Image (cartoon, helix red, strand yellow):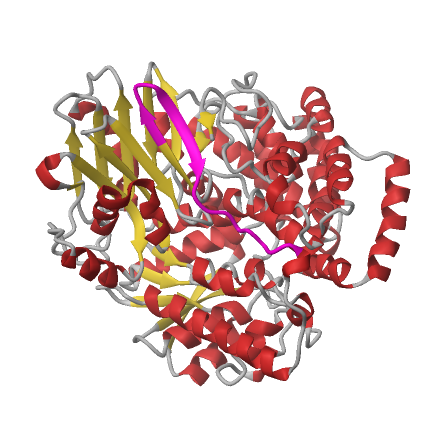
Amino acid sequence: MCGIVAIFSADGGLGPGDLTAPMADLRPRGPDGEGTWVSPTGRAALGHTRLAVIAPASGHQPIAGPRQSVQLVVNGEFYDYRAIRRELRAEGCRFRTASDSEIALHLYLRDGHRALDRLRGEFAFVLWDERRGTLFAARDRFGVKPLYYTERAGRLFLASEIKALLSCGAEARWDTASFAAHLQLGLPADRTLVAGIRQLPPGCFLEADAHGTRVRPYWDLDYPPTAELPPAAGPRQLARHLEAVREQVDEAVRLRTVADVPVACHLSGGLDSSTVAASAARHTRLTAFTVAFDDPAFDESAVARRTAARLGIAHREVPCPRGRFADQLGPTVRAGEMVQENSHGIARHLHSAHIKQEGFTVVLAGEGGDEVFVGYPQSRKDLALSLSAGARARAATGYARLAGQGLPPYLCATLGTLGFLPGWIVDRHLAVTQPVTALLRGDFAAELAAADAATPLLDAGAGQLAGRAPVHQSAYLFAKSWLPGYLLAAERLDSAQAVEVRLPFFDHHLFDVVRRTPLAWYDKDGAGKYPLRAAMADRLPREVLDGQKRGFFAPPMVDDDAMLSTLRSLTEEPALRDNPFFDPHAVRTLLDRLAAAPAARRAGSERLLQLVASTCALADAFGLSASAPAHPTPSHHGLGGHRRV
């Protein structure tokens, strides 16, 4: 994990000074060294802040190709790189460093953009090809590592963080259409909350030259059509599938334990992090870290402690008392560059800080297990629709009743295209989209009511949605919206503490095995995620294997009277008074009502108040102003003035 910045100017004129400000913003991501390079023609400038993980004494970037004609900067890791280095050496390639990053340069020189097919890992990189006058950039398949870009004054700017692009002169303006999309389905995969700043979508690459900027996909989730899914056959077929799952989990974890620095892991009381810890402990010396909350309803440290003892690994607990949440809200939002809806972001930020203080740089974590193995409660509802004609018939009756009462455009579009409403979309509508309306300013409430974040998403994914089972359609839409835009924003929280978190479940080789799972096997034991539970049955404690799904949630802030007082003080600040979304009077009214209510009756407003508070913190951190969006409604199949092919 490092920080990268790149600038392209077809007309030249770039110099080292153009990199100074964004490099300063990216220094927390890479405190172990930095380097810059500017093309002799002034058409390209690259900067890199390094977190030394592989070959600490080597691997400084930018990395130059033969005759300095190609220059590369990388954020993240390429796994199984040693085998690829051997292959390339046998073909005559000469390496300048001992790092994993350099394989991307030589693969590109050999294969062009098809080099991406060989890269395995969590990464974002930018490469300047002086011969062709082309800037080439790419992002990993699931979007674990970020890459943002913007255009200004005829120049293209790319960076690992939004704040670095703001330092390059991008305007700090809210994109109200993107915020509306976030409230409905999550950020579109190609947009941010800042007008004019885009994301390179997961599984895509970008090319820029004198003719413009083009964005193309190189990978997609590609769930099999229902007709091509294998049947849930007998015990022999099941045993073979479980063995394949086990082998791929082990390989994905093993590859991610390769590092020239000590390796740690996150450990909760759940199946996913316990699986990663159990597999990693087979390959490396490991220390597990667990967040310990002061509220027993949210604390899993006791289960994690017993799991660590069973696995024979060292264990550390990281106290995260709720009393620290108020002071940490601003720093967390600034680091994550995203609004939050639960204090788990604050806990993650504190957790990573503690891990770094203990001397660890690389951490393995369990994110992705629920996405890949259908583990969310909402996903299991979609699975029921996929397996039962009776469940589909009952759902159709309920949908008809809802449609008769009038649905917002984005739900109408989803229902009309899919014939059902994915569980996570229904949950978000009931928990956020609908109730937040009471807190909104009139203009933005009208914009939200008319917005349709679903249609561009459905249109762009039409080929991957057609003929698929409801559970796969739901998972695909989730991966294209909520996953990279919100859940994986934790990468920024970790990187602010100079910690690299690796996610074995987001391994495309593992995904390729799991996506072919017969649907009935996902819930075979009635507890969910059967293929993973069964594959790990002999490695994990029974209390973990039998445990119910628990998301990583922190204790609610609304239970704390001091926090309510802090939030009320925000209603007098410019960040709320001048923002285009929330009505300060409505927010004050809600806070007064909550303050008068018992703590046990406040929890239902937690997500709404987190949205308000973190929106204020984001505006304050980056000076975001209220103005009309610079772009049309977010689009998954168009990138403003850019061509996406």
**Would you say 398 lies left or right of 256 here?**
right
State the residue in front, 441 or 227.
227
Picture layout, residue 356 above or below residue 207: below
Estimate the x, y position of residue 134 in percent, counting from the top left: 27, 28
| Residue 96 horizontal side relative to residue 557, left or right | left
Residue in the picture at 63% in, 83% down: 235
Q: Is residue 621 visible?
A: no
The total number of labels drawn is: 0
Residue 127 shows in this picture: yes
Q: Residue at x 48, y 27 (%)?
A: 194
Picture residue at 23% right of the left edge, 28% below the top: 132
Please state which of residues 222 and 99 is positioned toward the viewer in this rendering. Answer: 222
Residue 208 on the magenta span:
yes
Q: Residue at x 55, y 51 (%)?
A: 222
Q: Position of residue 622 (x, y in %)?
A: 43, 29
Q: Which residues are magenta?
A: 207-225
